[in-house]
Amino acid sequence: MENGEVYRATTEAHPGPGRGARSGLAAYFTLSRLSGFRRLKILELVLSLLAFICEEVVSQCTLCGGLYFFEFVSCSAFLLSLLILIVYCTPVYDRVDPAKVKSSDFYITLGTGLVFFVASIIFALTHDNTITEIAAIVFGMLASLAYVADFSFMLREKCKEPQPRKGEAAVRRECLTEPLNA
């Protein structure tokens, strides 16, 4: 039997559109909506994950309240960042109102950044000076700075958007209710 006969039944020269280099879940994932400052979302995700991993490596603690609070906040920050990234990078973004996604992202980023900063300070005040605790605190502080920077970019972008005046909405409604040939 020749090699051509063996492989002919199972190998396709030109795979169909549903298969190939970007098939399965990878076909639904795109980074095109993460232009400019939105790439900070990836940095937030990585830093919060690193802070969580470093905190999980801590084997013993004297004052554990700060450690437990930091654990909760770093895990929550990672999961919220992952959720926002999934929404921005998948077709889910097309199915929901983009204004609501941006608004949710705005407030989630603000809240997560502030709470992460507070958790990092509390953990810094109660840690036992081990290298993993110090690394977790550094990653936590860097993550909180990334969240605050992301929030400030979103705030600047939000302030640049034109806001309708109170009288403008009434004028627009009048124009829509008048007949065109009046």
Image: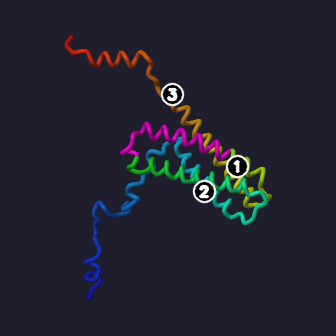
Mark sitting earlier along the chain (3/1): 1
Q: Residue at x 38, y 57 (%)?
A: 27
Chain part drawn in magenta: 93-117
Which secondary structure type mostly characterizes the magenta part of the structure?
helix
Q: Residue at x 69, y 48 (%)?
A: 119
Name the amino acid, label 2: Leu
- For the residue labelled by badge 2, is the local secondary structure a helix, a strand or a loop? helix
Q: Give residue 11's quadrant in the image.
A: bottom left
Name the amino acid, label 1: Ser
Q: Position of residue 24 (x, y in %)?
A: 37, 62
The quadrant of the image that shows the C terminus is top left
Res 100 visible: yes
Residue linked to disc 2: 49
Residue linked to disc 1: 120
Mark sitting earlier along the chain (1/2): 2
Alpha-carbon span between mark 3 and mark 1: 32 Å
Q: Residue furthest top?
A: 182
Q: Residue at x 65, y 47 (%)?
A: 116
Name the amino acid, label 3: Lys
Q: Position of residue 181 (x, y in %)?
A: 19, 13
